[in-house]
Amino acid sequence: MALGHRVRGNRVRAVISSIAAVTALGALLTGCAADPAEPAEGATQAVEVRPELRAMLPGELRAESTRIAVGTESGYPPFEYTNEAGRIVGFEIDLFDAASKRLGIKYNFVDMPWDSLIDELYASNVDVVAAAMSDTPERQIESDFVDYYNDSDAIMVPAGNPAGIKTLEDLCGRNVAVLGGTDPIDYTSQQTALIALNESECKAKPIVITPFGTDADALAQVEAGKADAELTQWSTGVYNAKQIGSGDIFEVANTEIINPTPLGFRFLKGDVELVRAYQAALQSLIDDGTYAEILEKHDLSVGALETATVNNQQP
């Protein structure tokens, strides 16, 4: 059941108002899973509602029965992943949970493949995407981001780095797996970076770029010897290098920072009130130390922001 429809920036979108509605949505989306019993596991610390921040929400989202739908792809640790109990957990999950509690807004995650996320956002089937998405100028044309973290890229290779890969240019002529899609709208920033390399440094010896629907599938190609490397986000690469096996299956090849970029919660262009409310909520978490606690919990303090920005623009 939806509360109704509203028009923002020439788009009509529905606000999902019950767990049953989100569960039904999950059944309609290919590869989608939602937990009808309870939301994804969030931050452990208590976060109080700030009435002045809740007042920033659109009026229809202040109803106690309202739930928003949040699209995610739960195969991307440490940002979001499924634990042994089948719960979606991770840094971004904890942070979105804390920001939503600060606003007093309920939500449910809708788990789907990466290449479905933006289509479902544009179709108004989800209200926001929380999936470690890079905030880029190209994406800002159709979306608005509330930035929460700074990250860069990692070149994942087999342990021991038998090919001696250290830089992006070392990928020229090699097979490289990446999280991404076949439609440009579904390209990740890593996939876009590889395409740019093929148009510049690797023009004579192009990279064979193979996109996969999950980061885990892309990384599995490296383990199986079907890809020489995988390009992923630094935090995810470091996490996987430490956690998979006994930490002796993969390693991060590069020691220099590659493609630094902010990550953000992604909203439809024109959802100004919702965007500003989440920006203010995140800033309050930064100011009171909750943000730092969540970062420390996930060993991600290195990418901390001092200011919550929209579209990477200082207020």
Image: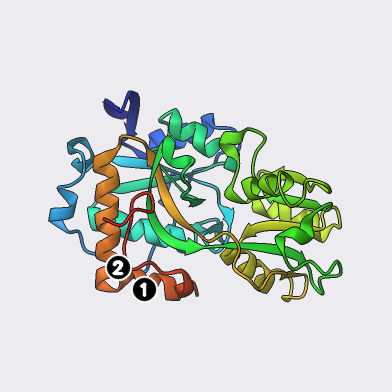
- How crowded pointer 1 is (Cα within 10 Å; few <14, some 14-19, many 20+) is rated as some
Q: Out of 91 and 42, give the one closest to the viewer.
A: 91
User: Could you tell me residue 51's position as x and y percent?
Assistant: 13, 55
Specify the quadrant that holds the C terminus. bottom left
Specify the quadrant that holds the N terminus. top left
Residue drawn at x 86%, y 70% as measured from the top left? 162
What separation in Å lies between label 1 and label 2 (alpha carbons)?
A: 7 Å
User: Could you tell me residue 284's position as x and y percent?
Assistant: 24, 64
Q: Secondary structure at mark 1?
A: helix
Q: Amino acid at mark 1?
A: Ala
Chain-order first, disc 1 or disc 2: 2
- On the image, numbered disc 2 is attached to which residue? 286
> Does residue 113 appear in the picture of this structure?
no
Tags 1 and 2 touching, CB below 8 Å: yes
State whether residue 174 is above or below residue 273.
Answer: below
Q: Secondary structure at mark 2?
A: helix
- Image check: 116 left or right of 251? left
Q: Out of 298 and 172, give the one closest to the viewer.
A: 172
Which disc, if any, is residue 292? 1
Q: Out of 240 and 194, give the one closest to the viewer.
A: 194
State whether residue 18 is above or below residue 108.
Answer: above
